[in-house]
Amino acid sequence: MGKILITGGAGYIGTHTCVELLNSGYEVAVIDNLSNSDRKSLERVKQITSKEVSFYEGDILDSDILGRIFEENKIDAVIHFAALKAVGESVEKPLDYYKVNIAGTLELLNAMKKYNVKKMVFSSSATVYGVNNPAPYKEDMPLSATNPYGTTKVFIERILDDLYTSDNDWAIAKLRYFNPIGAHESGLIGENPNGIPNNLMPFITQVAVGKREYLGVFGDDYETRDGTGVRDYIHVVDLSLGHIKALESLENKKGSEAYNLGTGKGYSVFDIVKAFEKVNHVEIKYEIMPRRAGDIAESYADVKKAERELKWKADKDIEDMCRDSWNWQKNNPNGYK
Ligand code: NAD
Ligand code: UD1
């Protein structure tokens, strides 16, 4: 146990991870510039856990505030979520993505080095498997990217490997998330996208709550069971628990290791729509649209490495994910506003 610095801790996965860390007895400090989140999210974390978070509103590109955090707190390890994450936007604004994701990570790593904190859990993504590997994806497959967002994740993984090579005191877990959905069972925290959602589940919940008329299904002519895209959806609480297991693994394992965090099961867009309708008793209208540029037919994880080395396995099923996503959305139709 000790104090963990969470960058981007006010965001979707960050808030859920704060809750699980606090419930497990860790202390937590958060840095977040609230560019894609609301300070209310951390008040909700407090409401759920009855515990305090040391919150610093600031940017990971700001070395002064990073220094202040390490001076004022005895940080044992860092979980690094802060990043820009919209694939389409990254094609429009590559310089913003390279600055926040790559330069921001470099600032953070420099501060960690200065204060001799050499344990990091990093948010990578299944997107690093690119478009040429066959599913199920295994950690030792070659990495590639087709857009600036993905490139930042591939590049940061490489930076972390090089850092470990230069100094074998570092202990780094690169967690490759598949598709996180769902929300805490309290319905108090959840995903809160700005504007029109890019991802499937927030779009479905906005259709269900009446904010959008219908779901556009991006292609029904893929080579999959029913023609729609297949993904490995994982409940955000399972994902958060994976971070705690990864932190524990860093206690006695130096290196720079990648782990897939998924369930290992693939579900199509139609599977998700049907499951959502069934467990929540709502209708999701949809229309078939053209394929979305950059999409692949199927993506799901080989989860054996995380099971074996982190002693972690996702527990919740697709119905839990659909129920909890809806519970959050219907109780908070306008997110934290
Ligand atoms: P999110 O946008 O909800 O959380 C990111 C947080 O970082 C936000 O609260 C934002 O305000 C903050 N932030 C952004 N730039 C910052 C900066 N310069 N300084 C300080 N704070 C900053 O996103 P999320 O879904 O919780 O994702 C967390 C991480 O997981 C990201 O690195 C993302 O790339 C990665 N990831 C997410 C998914 C997903 O589907 N949600 C999948 C794979 C990987
Ligand atoms: C997207 C990102 C990917 C990122 C991942 C997790 C793109 C091109 N890729 O991928 O880099 O790692 O999120 O955050 O944005 N779908 C619809 N209608 C919608 C939305 C989605 O049919 O309105 C379909 C998609 O075609 C896909 C599935 O639903 O088959 C899941 O989509 P999404 O939630 O965006 O995740 P990914 O495609 O895996």
Image: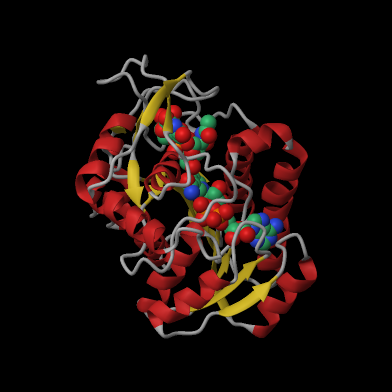
Q: Would residue 88 be found to the left or right of residue 17 on screen?
A: right
> Residue 313, can we see it?
no
| Residue 146 place in picture, x, y as percent | 59, 26
Residue nearer the viewer, 60 or 278: 278
Which quarter of the image is occupied by the C terminus? bottom right
Residue nearer the viewer, 244 or 116: 244
The residue under the point 48% across, 66% down is: 15
- Compared with 203, 297 (above or below) is above
Residue nearer the viewer, 311 or 180: 180
The quadrant of the picture showing ligand 1 is bottom right
Which quarter of the image is occupied by the N terminus? bottom left
The residue under the point 28% across, 34% down is: 267
Q: To which quarter of the image does residue 6 belong?
A: bottom right
| Residue 239 place in picture, x, y as percent | 37, 55
Residue nearer the viewer, 189 or 284: 284
Q: To which quarter of the image does residue 67 belong?
A: bottom right
Q: Would residue 52 be found to the left or right of residue 310 on screen?
A: right
| Residue 114 place in picture, x, y as percent | 71, 69
Q: Looking at this view, name the residue that lies furthest to the left.
A: 278
| Residue 41 place in picture, x, y as percent | 52, 69
Q: To which quarter of the image does residue 196 belong?
A: top right
The residue under the point 70% across, 82% down is: 71
> Residue 249, can we see it?
yes
- Compared with 228, 152 (above or below) is below
